[in-house]
Amino acid sequence: AQSVTQLDSQVPVFEEAPVELRCNYSSSVSVYLFWYVQYPNQGLQLLLKYLSGSTLVKGINGFEAEFNKSQTSFHLRKPSVHISDTAEYFCAVTRVGNTPLVFGKGTRLSVIA
Amino acid sequence: NAGVMQNPRHLVRRRGQEARLRCSPMKGHSHVYWYRQLPEEGLKFMVYLQKENIIDESGMPKERFSAEFPKEGPSILRIQQVVRGDSAAYFCASSRGTSGYNEQFFGPGTRLTVL
């Protein structure tokens, strides 16, 4: 079975500062990795995904993530955040194939003006 | 090109009543997943369905919960005799379900409140 740990439940950061949201996973099989964003009272929107190939993945809204197999991590980064990035961010993993996603508990990013 | 539709968006029920949540997948998608998000928690998988088939229901509570995805019409998640602990946001996602990777697209969710 897979599991996901998001190490920080809340991350406050000043506008235009860089941010890193941490995610570690465990799995005994090959996995796909994802980051989703959820704005208040809305559904989830896919930010980026790692399926295979290059370990550095670029997504929407200037976010990127790096897959590190040896450390079983998939941390999300943005070099300069905006107020509009304030939201809940979820890391997720799934086995290769059409299988359900396993989510972390989420990290609430608060961008301060 | 409409996305995944869920209705109602908000649902209030009293303890003991039934809740029916509907999910219409994106056009061309034949696979539906239901997830539940409890307050301050991530999403937890409940059930995975194809048209007229339940593929995986390992995340469904054994009692009071059922799901279907008929040949025609939306997928329905049904909760009988609701209790306060059922209060949560319920999300469905759909995918094409063909071989290889298939992205799951999420609906806006139904927020169930049990009084």
Image (cartoon, rainbow, N blue to C red):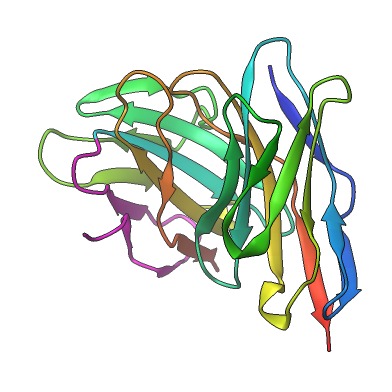
- Quarter of the image that includes the C terminus of chain A: bottom right
At which x and y percent is residue B111?
A: 49, 64
Q: Can residue B80 be seen in this snapshot? A: no
What residue occupies the far top of the structure in this picture?
A28
At which x and y percent is residue B32?
A: 34, 37
What residue occupies the far bottom of the structure in this picture?
A113
Left or right, B55 with reference to A9: left
Q: Magenta residues, as a range?
A: B1-29
The image shows residue A69, relative to residue B110, as above or below, that is: above
The reply to whether the magenta stretch includes residue B14 is yes
What residue occupies the far front of the structure in this picture?
A54
The reply to whether the magenta stretch includes residue B34 is no
At which x and y percent is residue B110?
A: 44, 61
Q: Which residue is drawn at 27% across and 47% down?
A: B25
Q: Which residue is drawn at 12% across and 33% down?
A: B71
Q: Quadrant of residue A27?
A: top right
The image shows residue B82, relative to residue B51, as above or below, that is: below
Q: Can residue A78 be seen in this snapshot? A: yes
Compare residues B86 and A113 and report the one nearer the observer. Answer: A113
Q: Residue at x 40, y 20 (%)?
A: B100
At which x and y percent is residue A112?
A: 85, 83
